Amino acid sequence: MYKLYLDCSGAILTIIVTKSNQVLASFSNSAAQKQTELAVETINNLLTKTKLSLKDINEVIITTGPGSYTGVRVGISFVKTLAVLNPKLKVFTVNTLLLQAGLKKAISIIAGYNQKSYLAVYNQGKEVIAPQLVTETAKQGIINDLKDFEVLIDYKTSNIIDNFLILNSKSDQIKVEDLKPLYLGDNFH
């Protein structure tokens, strides 16, 4: 069974091709503002390297956000197109904050907009505080209240490839027609 893991939601573009949970090829590198140009080209390069075609992919695990509005839409559009080529494709989702945290006891933070951050708290993959958009004051309050949680910011110290593979069982299977971005609005002020 061939799987494609895809995260276009932020400054780092991550794509992994696996067979039976063994990594055949991967890419995880800066793609700031270039997800649209790089995603399809990188997927094609990885498939060529592994001598696979898009129709060989049985499952896709994709991040749905929060993150770059355009990047999230690029990934989702690609998966919806792939499902047209392969109607038996199974689609799974994971949010970017959980992807960053993996199975750590962590406060997961990703830069948002208007001087705010996307934040969620996890303990071994279980949600402690749901993903939300927070002000700097709210973010600092959560960090101060949860001193025994590791603080992870903008994928700087996370191994996204390993986390994708670790979280495989925590991904949610959905119907392609239900695939949509996780957009977060203002909750705290």
Image: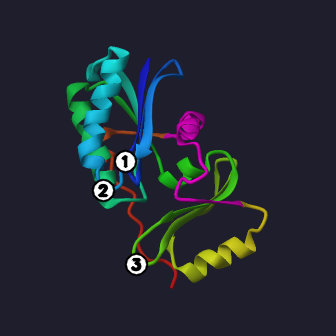
* Label 3: which secondary element: loop
**Residue nearest the observer in this picture, 2 or 15:** 15
Q: Magenta segment range? A: 150-171
Residue annotated with mark 2: 33
In terms of image quadrants, where is residue 3?
Answer: top left
- The amino acid type, in three-letter code, at marker 1 is Cys
Q: Which residue is mark 3?
A: 114
Q: Is residue 155 left or right of residue 79?
A: right
Cα distance in 3D space between marks 3 and 1: 21 Å
Q: Amino acid at mark 3?
A: Asn
Q: Name the residue located 60 percent from the left edge and 75 percent from the top edge.
A: 139
Q: Secondary structure at mark 1?
A: loop
Quadrant location of residue 61?
top left
Placement of the N terminus among the 4 image quadrants: top left
The amino acid type found where label 2 is placed reads Gln
Look at 55% across and 79% down and name the residue there: 136
Q: Earlier in the sequence, mark 3 or mark 1?
A: 1
Q: Which residue matches tag 1? A: 8
